[in-house]
Amino acid sequence: MKYPVLDLGAVNAPLMPAISAAIDEVVQSGRYVGGPVVEAFEEELAAATGTPRAVGVSNGLDAMRLIFKAYIELGRLSPGDAVIVPANTYVASFLAITDAGLRPVPVEPDAVTLNMDTTLLEAAYTPDVKAVLTVHLYGRACYDAALRDFVGRHNLLLVEDNAQAIGADGDVAGPLGTARTGALGHAAAFSFYPTKNVGALGDAGAVTSADTDLLDAVRALANYGSRERYNNIYKGYNCRLDPVQAAVLRVKLAALPAITAARRRNAAAYQAAIDNEAVTKPLMTAPDRCVWHQYVVRVSDRAMFRNYLAANGVGTDVHYPVPPHRQKCYAEYSALRLPVTELLADTVVSLPISEALTPAQIGEISRIINSYRP
């Protein structure tokens, strides 16, 4: 494939000397679990997101699981409580809710932003709703005045699934006075899976919050439920972030402004160059607050479009072809009718967008797309 949807070798190449040196420092230190490298990354992530503290964990799903489990241990949620969640999301968002014994309440997306339609929140509310999990899908923040006011009006917890939008900004500032994702709710979960804008060389995640009690509970739960060795206050897990991945992420996090700028440049180039009535481009705002984890277009015949692009050397992906309520593991939700979610699942296509792509390559991909005829 001349233009793969994501070439991690090319993405990581400019940073590999610094990454190799950082890994070697950890290897030579003899400290392979916890320690100063993990602590330094946590401090740097908190600073980058405008939050007081962060806790490194094993992956993005565990970050969400730990948040909900911590809220239950602290008595702020109870098993059986309902959590509003976007219907158009990766299944991990649902998995974290149900793993804690909570009940997801799916809300349809806005067909333009592809994020949860915040105008539908009030209709989804019932007295058993105690929290909202907002998902910043594809790098676009899902946080506006409607969501902020809804959460405040009903005294709900707001958790961010920030797996895809590190460095993005919402429409309005959150309670900490910043619009930056990761600081908009009561707690936020991050994924640093290798394909993310800030990607580890394996699995990694984090939780950010201004709530000291919550983060202390998250850290303990991630360490077998223990704050002190052999003193287990919770029935916990082993969900720690290892220092090798923390070392990699310190290098990647320092490069985040450049990564975001390059992705925004590429998205703007697509927006200017793609001119085909058969292809619906994503929303582009001014100023551009999205960090473009994915550049997602919509087409009526996805198989034909993807086959055409593949034949011309352009790789694509689909995020996501099967929504959570249609997954076998959530058969209890299969009767739900979520037409906007299902339409998006049938029509979305992710194009190459990484910072490794040049403007010339974006131009060539756009020319290929403009020649597509369904």
Image (spheres, helix red, strand yellow):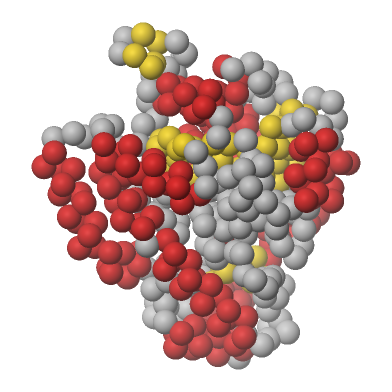
Q: Which residue is drawn at 17% across and 55% down?
A: 21
What's the residue at 16%, 47% (across, down)?
25
The spot of residue 333 in percent (x, y) is 74, 37
The quadrant where residue 133 appears: top right
Is 247 on the left-hand or right-hand side of 44? left
Please, is residue 356 above or below residue 198 in the view? below
User: From this viewpoint, is residue 196 visible?
Assistant: yes
Write the residue at 56% across / 46% down.
182
Quadrant position of residue 295: bottom right
Residue 61 screen position, x and y as percent: 50, 38
Q: In this view, does 101 lie above or below 137?
A: above
Q: Which of 221 and 1 is in front in this view?
A: 221
- Relative side of 289 to 39, left or right: right
Identify whether 115 is placed above or below 9. Answer: above
Residue 349 in percent (x, y) is at 60, 68
Q: Can residue 107 be seen in this view?
A: no
Residue 89 % position (x, y): 64, 49
Q: Image point 51% across, 54% down: which residue?
A: 166
For this orientation, the residue located farthest to the left is 28
Which residue, as the protein is rendered here, is positioned at the far right? 123
